[in-house]
Image (spheres, rainbow, N blue to C red):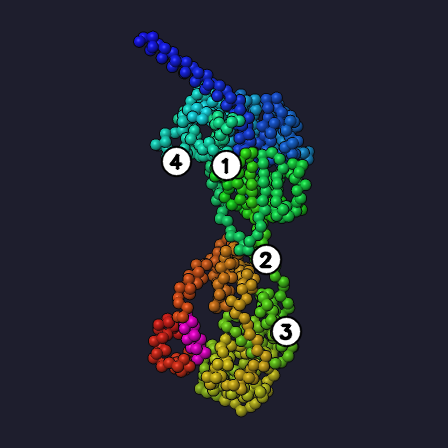
Amino acid sequence: MTGAVARSRQREIDIESESTMASEADSARLRSHGARELVALFHVVAFHSAANILVFSADGVCTDASIGLCRLLGVSPKRMIGEPLSEFLEEKSGAPLLPGPDQRDLASIPVREIVLRCSNGLKMAAQCAIHPNVWPEHHLLVLPESFLPAPLTSCEPDALSAWSLDYALFLTSPDGRIVSWYSGAERLFGYAAEEAVGKHDTCLLPDLESSPDSCAQDSQCDPTNVLSCCEGLRKRKDGSHFWANVVSKPLRNDGGTLMGFARVARNFDKRQERMEWLRRQRGRIRPLPAEPHSAGLVSITAAGPPELNPVLLEMLGYTPEDFLSGDLQWPDLTPPSFAPLDALAHEEELLFGASAPYEKELIAKDGTHIPVLVISGLLRLAPLRWICFAQDLRERNRVESLESTEPTPSTGFEEMVGASASLKRVVRQIEVVAPTDATVLILGETGTGKELVARAIHRLSPRRLRPFISLNCAAIPTGLLESELFGYERGAFTGALTQKVGRFEMANGGTLFLDEVGDIPLDLQPKLLRALQEKSFERLGGSKTIPINVRLIAATNRDLSQMMEDKLFRSDLFYRLKVFPITTPPLRDRPEDIPVLARHFTKLYSERFGRGIQRIPAETMRAMVAWPWPGNIRELENFIERSVILSTGTVLHAPLQEIKKEAAERQGSSSLERVERDHVLKVLRESGGVVTLAATRLGLHRTTLNALMRRLNISRKDI
C-alpha cells in the first residue's frame, strides 16, 4: 500500500515538473516572439501625426522617428533612421545627449534643454524628456506638442506628464501572468521586474467593488481581435490610482495558438483632461449639403506610402506617382494646427475602432487649404491598416458664407435681390416699360416687393431726377383719402385753415405710386379716373383746374377682376390702370432666391446691429428654403432681423422652432378645413372685410358666415 502511494506521488511530481518545464518553454517563446510584437504595438500607439518623438539605441543612433518630428526638422523618416542623433539635435550645454540613470519614478525624469537642427539650417531651442529603456537598449525622446503653432494646445496643463507620456510595455501569458516587464512599466506602476514577473495582472487593478468604473481585467480582453483598448483606473505598487489607457494585442504562433498578449499602458490622468477639451473644441458637426457627393478615401499602413482613391487625388490635385517614393506621407497633408485633432482621432481609433467625425483642412498640391469632414478607422485585419474618409466641405461653406457668389445686380435694380427665372422676367418687363410714360399696374401678394418694382421703374425712367411720391391708400381713412390725393383749399371744410397740396400736385413732373389701389372707395374712383384721363384736377373746395404731368404706378394684392364683377371696383378705372401689368412672384415660387435673400438680409442687419455674423448654417438654410413664407419677402426679412438680434457669435442662430411649429400646425389640420379657411379669408379680403358682402359672394347668410368664421378661427386681424 505504501509503495503504491509513493509511486502515485512520484507521478504527480513528474507531471508538475513537466508542466513547469512546458510553462517555462512557453514563456521563453513568448518573450522571444513578443519582444518584436511589443515594438510594433508601441509604434502603432505612439507614432501619430501630432507626436514629436523618436527612438534611439544605446549607442545614440536613431532607430525610429514620428512624422511630426520629421516634419518639424524638415527631413523624411528614411533620412533620420540609422543616423546619429548629433545630426539633428544636441544638448544645449554641448554635452552628449545620453539618457540619465534608469529612474523608476516618472516625476524624476528630468527635462533636457536641447537644440534642434533643421534641414534648412535653422536651429531651435527646445525642451525634451528622455525615457530610458522603454524596451531593452532603446530610449524614447519626447518633445512637447506645443511646437505646433495651434491654439488647440494653448490650455495644456504645464505638468510634464501632459505631453511626455511614459509607455509601460509588458507581456502576459494567456491566463494573465506577467512574463516580461520593461523599464517603462517599472516607472509607471512602481514594481521592479523581479517583483512583477510571475504575478497575475490583476495586481495592477484596483478593488473592483470600490472602483466600478475600472474597465474589465486586462487578461480578459478578446483574443480574437487584432487590437483591443480600454481605459480605467489602475493601481501602483504604493496603492495610488491613476487613469490608464491600455492597448493589447493577442500573440499567436504559426499554428494559430494563443501564446499571450503584448500590452502598452499609459498614464492618462492629464491627457484625459486635454482630450476632453479637444472634444469640446471639435464641437458639433455642421450638416452637410443635401446633395450626395463622392467621398475621398485613403488607406494607410504602418509602413509604405498611402493609397488615395481618385476622388481624393482629384480633390487635392495629386497623382499616385507623388506618393510612390514614400517621402510624402498622409500627415504631411494636414496643416500643423489640426495635428492635435488628428491625435485625438488616433486615440479614439485605438479605443473604439473609429474616430468621431471632425472637420479639418487638407493641403492641396498647389498649397491651398481644402476644408473636409474626416472619419478615420483602424481596420481589424493583419497587417494593421488605417482608412480615412474625407468629404469636401467647400460647397457647404460656400452656401453658408455671407459672401454672395451671385452676379451683381444691374444699375437700377440694386434693391431687387435674386436670380430666379421669375424675377428675371419681372426685371425684363421693368426694362421694357420704364423708358415710357405708360401707366403700370403691379399685382402680387403682400410682401412680394411691389414698391421696389415701382422704384426701379422710376429710377430707369426719364423722370428719375423728378420726385417719386408714394401713398398707401389702405392706410388713409376713407374720408381723408380725397384730400390726400388732390389737396384742398383754405376753408374747404371745418378745420381747413390753410391750403394743402395733394400727392398729385407734389408728384408733378415725376412719378406717383398708389399702393393698395384696390382699397380706394368706390365714390372716389371717378375723380381719380378723370385726373388720369384729363391730366388735370381741382383741389377739394376749389374751382381752379390744375394741369399735371404725372406718371402713375399702382399696386394691389387684391383680385381687381373679381372686385370689378362684384361692383366693388369700376371697370373703366381698372382698364385705365391695366395698361402694362406686372405680376411679382410669391417667394414660394422662387425658392432658389431664398439663400441669396437670407444672406443679403443677414449682412444688412448684422452691420446695422453691430453683429459679426459670417455664415448661416446649412441646416438653417434648408429649413428656410423648405418654408413656404406666406408673408413672402417681408416675412423672411423680419425673420432674419429677429435671428440677427438673437445671435451673439459669428453664426446665425435662427429660431427655427417657430416655423417648424407653424409647419406642424399647418400639416396637422385637415386638407378640407385648410382649403375652406383659405377660401373664406380670400373672399373676406377681396370684400374689404365687409362680412355682408363676403356672405353674399359666398351664398351664405350673414349669421352663418359669422359662425363659420368662429369655427375656422378667423378674426379681424387675419383679414
Sooner in the amino-acid sequence: mark 3 or mark 2: 2
Please give the name of the residue rendered at 61% of the width and 48% of the height, measured from the top-left corner: 311
Sooner in the amino-acid sequence: mark 1 or mark 3: 1
Please give the name of the residue rendered at 42% of the width and 64% of the height, measured from the top-left corner: 667
Which quarter of the picture shows residue 231?
A: top left
Give the residue at mark 3: 431
Give the residue at mark 4: 213
Magenta residue span: 674-687
Give the residue at mark 2: 403
Distance CA(mark 3)–CA(mark 2): 28 Å
Disc 2 crowd, CA 10 A, few/some/many (<14, 14-19, 20+) = some
* Mark 3 secondary-structure assignment: helix
Work out which residue is located at the far bottom of the displayed protein and give it.
543
* Mark 4 secondary-structure assignment: loop
Please give the name of the residue rendered at 39% of the width and 81% of the height, measured from the top-left corner: 699
Horizontal placement of 543 versus 701: left or right? right
Distance CA(mark 3)–CA(mark 4): 74 Å
Give the residue at mark 1: 350
Q: Which amino acid, by three-letter code, is at mark 3?
A: Glu
Q: Which amino acid, by three-letter code, is at mark 1?
A: Leu
Q: Nearer the viewer, mark 4 or mark 1?
A: 1
